[in-house]
Amino acid sequence: MSRRTFTRSAVVLGAAGALAGLGALGTARAASLPGGADWLAGLPDSAPLARLTIPGTHDTCALYDGPLVQCQNLSVPDQLTAGIRFLDMRCRAINGVFAIHHSQFFQNIFFGDVLNDCQAFLAQHPGETVLMRVKQEYSTVSDADFAAIFNTYLSRWPGLFWMENRIPTLGEVRGRVVLLADNGGLPGVGWNGPLMDLEDDYDIGTIFDFNGRKWPEVSAHLNAAQAATDPQRLFITFTSSSGWGLWPRQAADAMNSDLAGYLAGLDHASRPALGVVPMDFVTTTSPAAWYGLNFGA
């Protein structure tokens, strides 16, 4: 299958255009919001994480290796500063460390680099928290061996992770990383377990499949999150997809158009809680359209 090669500048410009609708809050509404680096600090300690709207990134560190692989443009520090609070870490276990991969493609960063970024950000913004999925990617070590490597990171970054198997309130986890464990050997909130309601239908072959399957699934799951009331059930709605005839950038363009229309149709004054919403190709301004819902904006 042959496709024309996209330059990085074209990808960046395309991402900015596709996300313009998500970032357009209006001057008055934007002025009333906290900045992206400190928005959780503006919410009460009693707020259950499961009853918030939390923008995130799918395949957080997938910045390299071309249009079939790349899912993001911003580094982890830039994502956190923009307001992203869910990170999707795909960890290859190799030589006693975690290399961050997207499938077989190494993304020029290691798990320790990401933890350094998170620790530095949270030290500067102690009112914030970060939810982090940790998943084994492109390696097949046992859960026990994967956990043994993870434990070496715990010893080097003591106190950074919050690892209980329940959904906390915001006040319990300010300044820390909440572990969402997508590996049987890890502690924390179990991925797609009884405390989680997950939508992640990602293998979407064409734009016709997107329109007929992916978007209806996403919108229905966002509606379910909005209607939910259980503070111990975390909704996570992945908006990302790709397939043999639909690359990540094209899927993101289509999704962002639909998401902008969905957000425009919400009653913002009711502060709808949509759960965690991981996205591809976020910009420095697009997360505000999501975290603004927590403030009625």
Image (cartoon, grey):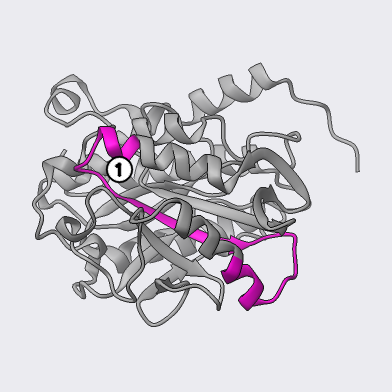
| Whether residue 4 can be seen here | yes
Return the residue nearer the eye: 54 or 89. 89
Residue shown at 64%/58% (left/top)? Answer: 209
Residue under label 1: 290
Residue 57 falls inside the magenta stretch: no
Looking at the rendered image, the quarter that the N terminus falls into is top right
Residue 162: quadrant of the picture: bottom left
How many numbered marks have been drawn onto this rendered protein structure?
1
Looking at the rendered image, the quarter that the C terminus falls into is top left
Q: Amino acid at mark 1?
A: Trp
Look at the image and give the residue range highlighted in magenta: 121-148
Looking at the image, residue 81 sits to the left or right of residue 147; the answer is left
x, y percent for residue 288:
29, 34
Residue shown at 24%/36% (left/top)? Answer: 125
x, y percent for residue 44:
8, 51
Q: Is residue 148 above or below residue 63?
A: below
Return the residue nearer the eye: 189 or 270. 189
Residue shown at 13%/22% (left/top)? Answer: 28
Residue shown at 24%/44% (left/top)? Answer: 128
| Whether residue 296 can be seen here | no
x, y percent for residue 164:
32, 72
Looking at the image, residue 289 sits to the left or right of residue 240; the answer is left
| Local SS, label 1 | helix
